[in-house]
Amino acid sequence: MFKIGVISASTESAQHMIELAESILKKDSYKYIPYIYNSFTALKNIMIQHSNQVDGLLFTGPNPYYFAKKYINNEQLTTVCSVISGYEIYKYILEYLYKNMNNSLRISMDCPIQEIEIFKESLNMLKIPHKDFFLQQYNIPCIFDDVIKKHRQLWQSHKIDIIFTTLHAVQMELEKLNIPCKRIEVGINSWRQAIQLLDEKLTGLHFRNSQLGIICIKIKNYDEFIGHYGNYYKLQKLELLLKNNILSLCQTVNGYLIEKNDGYYEIFSSRGSIENHSTEISSFITEIQLNCHVDILCGIGLAPTVFGAQVNAHKALANGHENTQNSIYIIDGEK
């Protein structure tokens, strides 16, 4: 079962997203965990503490994603609902006009600077006079008080009749001040597309991680290695120590070990496990060379089939013999 973190500034939005996702995807395949933030500092802490505890992330809107993406692990599967389109803007404006029957738009609206051109383009397409329309832009992370201040000043100056905001915190504060305010949210279609895209990514990851991976470990210049130790018992003790360490690595990557002749070992595992434990594999090689005083080559082959993974692993070992600068080589059948 995949764990999906749902990131939103609003509990209602997060729950709505989860209900929509459950109606689209198989319930027994996904578990949804809502993460609600009330400030960008809180969002940063959520990313640092929890992003590695889930398999994927769904953002109910673009704003938190713009801020949080630098804290997301590169391997983290993430989808963000697309930017607010003209359709959402038209919806809120037409609803307002229908209720108030004004001949012009006296509105203050805010949006992230990343989407300012989309907002301007959408407004220019309106066939309704909007000479008293004020568009506020903000950076991510934004200072909520600055956005609130701009809206409030326009309201107090009697230049506007309503405020449309894309920020949940701004909406909450303006409503406390009894200033007419509506929140512009990403539409259901954008949510649906994000959910389906995340499903495709996770399904692709599942098949990718199920592909084969083989780690070939070989004592470099094995004949010289034997001649150096000479004493049979010393040699056996060293090889037993080496094998014990390789078994520990095998357990780490959840693999199956095959010992061959002449100081050569193969670990059969999965692509996902090898990629997730790349740091441990690198540390293993370094520790063996320091503690056992033996030069080790490591060739890793990745491919959809066992044969392809073995061929790639052997090619990787050959590269190691030709180049003395690195101890680990990886050949990926997909690249």
Image: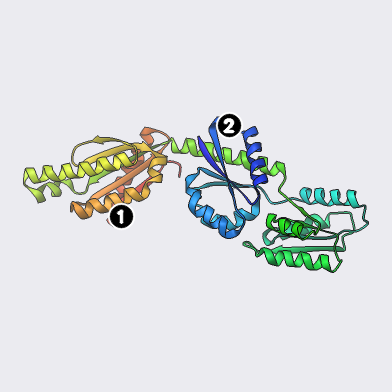
* Rendering coords of residue 77 (x, y %): 53, 45
Quadrant where the C terminus sits is top left
**Drawn side of residue 123 relative to residue 192, left or right:** right
* Rendering coords of residue 206 (x, y %): 48, 36
Taking the spot 26% from the left edge, 44% from the top edge, the residue there is 217
Nearest to the observer: residue 47 or residue 262: 47
Q: Residues within 10 Å of mark 1 (few under 14, many from 20)?
A: few
Tell me: residue 132, above or below residue 28.
Answer: below
Q: Is residue 268 visible?
A: yes
Taking the spot 21% from the left edge, 41% from the top edge, the residue there is 243
- Disc 2 residue type (three-letter): Lys
Disc 1 versus disc 2: nearer the observer = 2
* Rendering coords of residue 133 (x, y %): 83, 62
**Drawn side of residue 250 relative to residue 219, left or right:** right
Q: Earlier in the sequence, mark 1 or mark 2?
A: 2
* Rendering coords of residue 263 (x, y %): 19, 42
Quarter of the view holding residue 307:
top left
Q: Residues within 10 Å of mark 2 (few under 14, many from 20)?
A: few
Q: Which numbered dot is residue 326?
A: 1
- Disc 1 residue type (three-letter): Asn
Q: Which numbered dot is residue 27?
A: 2
Distance between mark 1 and mark 2 Cα atoms: 46 Å
Taking the spot 72% from the left edge, 49% from the top edge, the residue there is 185
